[in-house]
Amino acid sequence: QSALTQPASVSGSPGQSVTISCTGTSSDVGGYNFVSWYQQRPGKAPKLIVYDVSNRPSGVSDRFSGSKSGNTASLTISGLQAEDEADYYCSSYRTTNTRVFGGGTKLTVL
Amino acid sequence: QVQLVESGGGVVQPGRSLRLSCAASGFTFRTYGMHWVRQAPGKGLEWVAVISYDGRDKYYGDSVKGRFTISRDNSKNTLYLQMDSLRPEDTAVYYCAKDAVAVTGELDYWGQGTLVTVSS
C-alpha cells in the first residue's frame, strides 16, 4: 500500500497563506470524495480539521480549507498563526474499504 | 464528551504476541466503526485496521494482514487489537480512532495512544 504523496515541509510567515498538496491515484483520492486532513502537534494525537474534501468539523477555524482536483487534494491555511505550526496529514478512503495516509507535512511558521 | 483510552502497550520480544484495548465512552459505541492507526517513532501515520459497528466486517493494511486481528465487544464498549508474530518494524504508538460514519467516514476522535516496542 503506497502512501499518498505530500511535501515533507512547507513554511510561511504569520498572516500569509500556505497550501499543502496530497497526491494519490484514481483508487483513492481521485475516486472518492472521502479525503480528510489531520493536524498533529508534537506529542499529541492527531486532530481532524477537514473531512469529505472540504468540510470543517465544528470548532475548526475557517482559516483551514480543503479542495480536490483529479488525484490531488489540497489543504490551504490562510492567515497563518504561530499556533498552526504542526504536522499535517491527508488521508483517503481507498478501494476495498481500506484507508491510506500521506507521509505528512511539517509546517513551520517563520 | 467522547473519550478513547488505549492500554496494553509495552515491550515485547520479536515473534511474541500482545493485545491492545481501547475503552470508549461518551458516544453510542455500538453504532460506529472503529479504527487502529499507528505511528512509528519520528514517522508518519499508518492505517492499520477498521471494524464495522457490529464486528462483522474487518479490513486490514497490507503490512499487518494475517498477523493482526481487530475485534470489539459492544457490551463492554471496548475495541481490541490482537497482534501476533510481532516484528521490530511494528514498534509504534498505536491509536484507536472512531469513524464518523461506518467504515468509510473520517476519523473524528482519537485516543492518546499506547506505545508498543518490539525488541529483544
Image (cartoon, coloured by chain):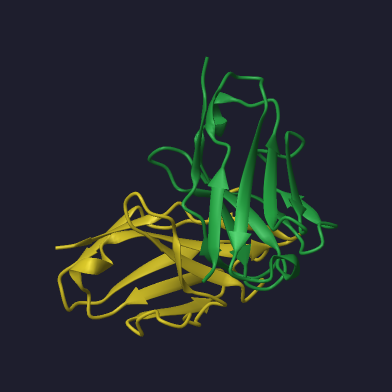
Chain colours: A yellow, B green
Extreme right residue here?
A: B56
> Foreground residue, A108 or B119?
B119
> Foreground residue, B62 or B15?
B15
> Where is residue B6 shown, x and y percent of the image?
55, 48
**Res B84 quadrant in image:** top right
Side of A106 where A3 appears, left or right: right
**Image: B39 above or below A78:** above
Extreme front residue here?
A: B76
Q: Which residue is located at x 33 percent, y 57 percent?
A: A41
Is residue A28 in view? no
Is residue A101 in view? yes
> Where is residue B76 shown, x and y percent of the image?
72, 55
**Image: B96 above or below A66:** above
Side of A74 where B4 appears, left or right: right
> Where is residue A87 shown, x and y percent of the image?
35, 57
**Res B106 quadrant in image:** bottom right
**Res B9 quadrant in image:** top right
> Where is residue B43 shown, x and y percent of the image?
42, 42
Side of A40 where A70 appears, left or right: right
- Tell how many labels: 0
Q: Which residue is located at x 49 percent, y 71 percent?
A: A73
Q: Which residue is located at x 36 percent, y 85 percent?
A: A62
**Image: B62 above or below B85:** below
> Foreground residue, A35 or B67?
B67
Q: Which residue is located at x 51 percent, y 20 percent?
A: B119
